[in-house]
Image: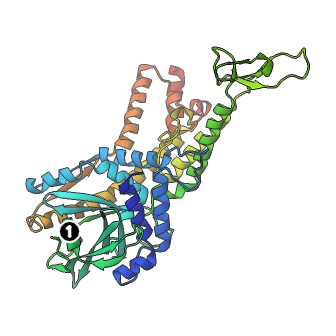
Amino acid sequence: MGLFENMWKGIRRMFRYTTLKTIVGKDVALSSRMIDAINDWKNMLDGNAEWLTDSIESLRIEHGICREFADVVLSEMESNISIDRLNQPYQKAISGLNENLQDGLGLGSFVLKPLGSGRAELVTADKFVPISFGDDGKPTDIAFFTLKRVGENDYFTRVERHYFEDGNLVISNKCYHSQDSSDIGQSCPLEEVEEWKDINPGPVMFRGMQQMDFGYYRNPIKNNIDGSACGVSIFDAARERIKKADLRGSQLDWEYESGERAIHVDNRALKQDKATSRFGMARLNKRLYRGLNLEAGKDQELLKEYSPELRDEAYKRGLEEAKREIEFIVGLAYGDLSDVQEVSKTATEIKVSKQRKYNRVNAIERKLEECLRDFVAGLAFYNNMYHSGYEFNCKFSDSILTDEESERQQDRQDVSMGVMSHAEYRAKWYGETLEEAESKLPEQNKVME
């Protein structure tokens, strides 16, 4: 594990409610329950879920869920700003949006924040603290944490706070020093860190800026953890099913490992190497032959084969069923995680699963567009173009349902060519058995067939 990851684990350990309240000087929206949930999601994404052991490895299903949603959402998106001076830094900022969106989906929320000079950063939920929210679910007071190590044991934490005062945006910066990465320590001047010496501690009020200077994205999922406006992981509801799938995967691995063919060799058949004093059989596979005292009588055979019957098909079915349960819970279509060849669903069920995925993707797209629109406002603010009359354009296509319609159109062509029967077409697209479809066909079609 690298230094950077260790330092951010220190930041996450600082995210205790009492510590945050002391830093901010007031109650914060990020409750202890949410802090624990975010840490849990982060561990799952890192392949360190609490149920994993030496014998149970992560299948990284969490990554698969986040990657699938991010790929579909961003493959459908086209966005730009009407003024080139803003569009260039905007396009640069979203060039790496896919991987960052995956993290945001996994941790429930993220902030896309302009830094000035055409730069931007995406901050995931484990690196900022929402202090309060407005009625629209967007932060009205928020703190960003930046950790810097100087030398071997000096840790500096910058707390950058954005909030509203008298309807105007206010930004302040504070610095803390500690010799323990898990403790924020005591207040100190920003000048103690070379990179921060030119930062204005503030508070600085920006009159006329009546919205936050960044975009905030939150998953379109109701927060049943603490009821706040904090975002919830896209895979939170499927946590127990992901645990079940990891267990099924480990059972399948063990079935293959324990079921390896072996030859039990009586000690009488082994020869001792004079150089090493070890017993063995020349030119034979070490995994295949195992020394064992089989002698029960002089006439008993020296070799016995161990070749148990594998039960892998049963474990495979169990794993695929767990994956399909996850797909249903998180809003993916059947076959996105599971083996599409193993999906024994009717056409109606498959169609419904695609519609379910479309609905979830569509909800994510609306939230993302709102985030990008606010980010563009922040970008315009830092480029002194907030009132320039720029236009932000964002468009998403409907590839999920479009692909289904394309498939349906192809089937219609197959019917007209005689490659597919009317009954087969009806059975596939109306969710009927072949017998039911045949009984419901118009008389002329039955005659034609």
Structural crowding at the residue carrying mark 1, measured as other residues with C-alpha within 10 Å and reported as few (<14), some (14–19) or many (≥20): some
Residue marked by disc 1: 196
The structure residue drawn at horizontal position 65% and vertical position 37%, both measured from the top left corner, is 254
User: Label 1 amino acid?
Assistant: Trp
Whether residue 28 is visible here, answered yes or no, is no
Q: What colour scheme governs how the chains and residues are painted in the rendered image of this protein?
A: rainbow
Give the camera-side residue of 427 and 138. 138
Q: Quadrant of residue 203?
A: bottom left
> At numbered mark 1, what does the secondary structure look like: helix, strand or loop?
helix
Whether 320 is drawn above or below 85: the answer is: above
Whether 272 is drawn above or below 46: the answer is: above
> Residue 260 appears at what percent x and percent y?
67, 27
Q: Is residue 7 left or right of residue 83?
A: right
The structure residue drawn at horizontal position 17% and vertical position 71%, both measured from the top left corner, is 199
Q: Quadrant of residue 216?
A: bottom left
Q: Quadrant of residue 142?
A: bottom left
Whether 154 is drawn above or below 344: the answer is: below
Give the camera-side residue of 356 and 232. 232
The structure residue drawn at horizontal position 50% and vertical position 60%, both measured from the top left corner, is 40
> Residue 32 appears at what percent x and percent y?
48, 73
Whether residue 330 is visible here, answered yes or no, is yes
